[in-house]
Image (tube, rainbow, N blue to C red):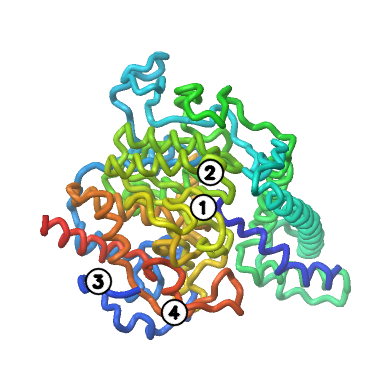
Amino acid sequence: MKFYLKPFIYSTVFATLLFACGGSSTGVLSTPIENIDTMPLKVSELTETQKQTWGHLDLVKDTIPGMSVDKAYGEIVKAKKGKTTIVAVIDSGIDIDHEDLDDVIWTNTKEIPNNGKDDDGNGYIDDIHGWNFLGEAYNEQLEYVRLLASGDTSNPRYSEAQTLYNSEIKKYTDYKVQYEQISQQVANADAAVSKYLKKDTYTQEEVNAIKTTDEALLQSIAVIKYVYSLDVGSVSDFKKEIQDGLVDINDRLNYNLNKEFKGRTTGDNPDVLNDKPGYGNGNVKPTLESESHGTHVAGIIAAERNNGKGVNGVANNVKIMAIRAVPNGDEYDKDIALAIRYAVDNGAKIINGSFGKSFSPHSDWVRDAIKYAAENDVLIVHAAGNDGEDLDSNYNYPNDQVSNGAEISNNFINVGSLDAVYGSKMVSSFSNFGKINVDIFAPGGEVYSTMPLSKYKTMGGTSMASPGVAGIAALIRSQYPNLKASEVKSIIVNSGLPLTTKVIVAGDANNVKPFASLSKSGKIANAYNALILASKSASNQ
């Protein structure tokens, strides 16, 4: 699962200019919930600090639907460090040398580095900080493209896959044309304005002050003014976003949707679960700087707190086990199933899975691994997905049930995404939802976190909401280590803030539903209340 690709919105919102110019209370909550739905909406713009920390802020105090993380540390955790908790991040590569992560990376002390031996006998050689199931590869096809490439017309979803493929090829081909047009137009407008002002960089005020009757220059000024109106920073920032968008579009066409592309290099058969034990290697780092998803997710969970750098993770006293199993495309069921088992067998108490797909030929392997985690008291937190769909009527894997039936385990939390604006636009336009299949919502839209090479950036997606909840789970298991995974799940879900306000769903202003109908709990995750309920639960044991 990729994070939500914000640049794709420009293909529609920029088009006009382009062509014109050419839940319920548990009774233990401390946060007062009775008036939340009638709270005054925040009308002022978020400050830069709020934009970078909004997921940690408090709904009542800040009128921002954060998780009350700062309040939890200030009033409950304080200086209590708790027990070190291992959180496995099954994702793309993680920059374990990042300035804000290097002190929170798990180390397998039973393994001797770089000796080419499986010292601890776990089946993985030199797995010092986790394991890399992808080997040197990164780009991959989508799962339904693999199905089409196989030519297995007897598959009951083959026709569906073909229809989806045709639709997606057209959509991304159109995106490519639109983005190239936008890129060229903005470049031309930027060059014209720069030439007039006799400087390569300029301010919005300088553009507004230009007085001219030259029609061509007026059109260029209109383009630049529109770019500024999108609130994306400078013209240079916008041009970079467009170029990044083009990279993603080309990746989709060249790799994800390319039926001829062969990405796997590990020498195993992805359709046989145990054909080649220990495939892959111990290098858990990204292969490219652009392979940033796992690093971003890890930072949300556990970036070093209060070290004067970058960001603060949700959880303190955490060690991140890095498991590279999610490519630039759809993950293989085999890799995910074995990654979950690796995490469980090597001491993880929480697993974050910010990935997912709509086709899953070996979904039973993954469900068996989820059950294995439950049997070993490991909690799994998973991103609900970025398709703006109702998961109760659409396929999404992995999950902990079949066809909306009974859950196979009590250790799986599926998380939807919130934006930073409380009220009708609170649910991220991209977020999946479902009264049966989504458990809770958390901050996921525009979250600031760590990036490779000790950098930082804002990204959005349910991929960013899931690690927020995983961080709360880690905080609970650290402070109250005797609580079971199933109890931690119950605590997180029951202690969330229940909201009944109506919200726009999937970014469609005509699709308005009560927030309570979008998840099983009808709530938003709250670290402060979760710790209060965890304390009560632990004291009753």
- C-alpha distance separating marks 2 and 1: 10 Å
Image coordinates for residue 81, horizontal then vertical, percent = 20, 48
- C-alpha distance separating marks 2 and 4: 32 Å
Residue receiving disc 1: 457
Q: Amino acid at mark 3?
A: Thr
Query: Which is nearer the eye, 280 or 162?
Result: 162
Residue receiving disc 2: 292
Q: Please rate how many residues cluster around mark 2, counting C-alpha atoms within 10 Å: few if below 14, some from 14 to 19, many from 20.
A: many
Image coordinates for residue 164, horizontal then vertical, percent = 70, 53
Secondary element under disc 1, as helix, strand or loop, is strand
Residue drawn at point x = 37 percent, y = 17 percent: 118
- C-alpha distance separating marks 4 and 3: 27 Å
Whether the residues at callouts 2 and 1 have beta carbons within 8 Å, the answer is yes
Is 181 left, or right, of 529 in this rendering? Answer: right
Q: Amino acid at mark 4?
A: Lys
Q: Amino acid at mark 2?
A: Ser
When asked about the image quadrant of residue 101, the answer is top left
Image coordinates for residue 532, horizontal then vertical, percent = 20, 64
Residue receiving disc 3: 26
| Earlier sequence position, callout 4 versus callout 3 | 3
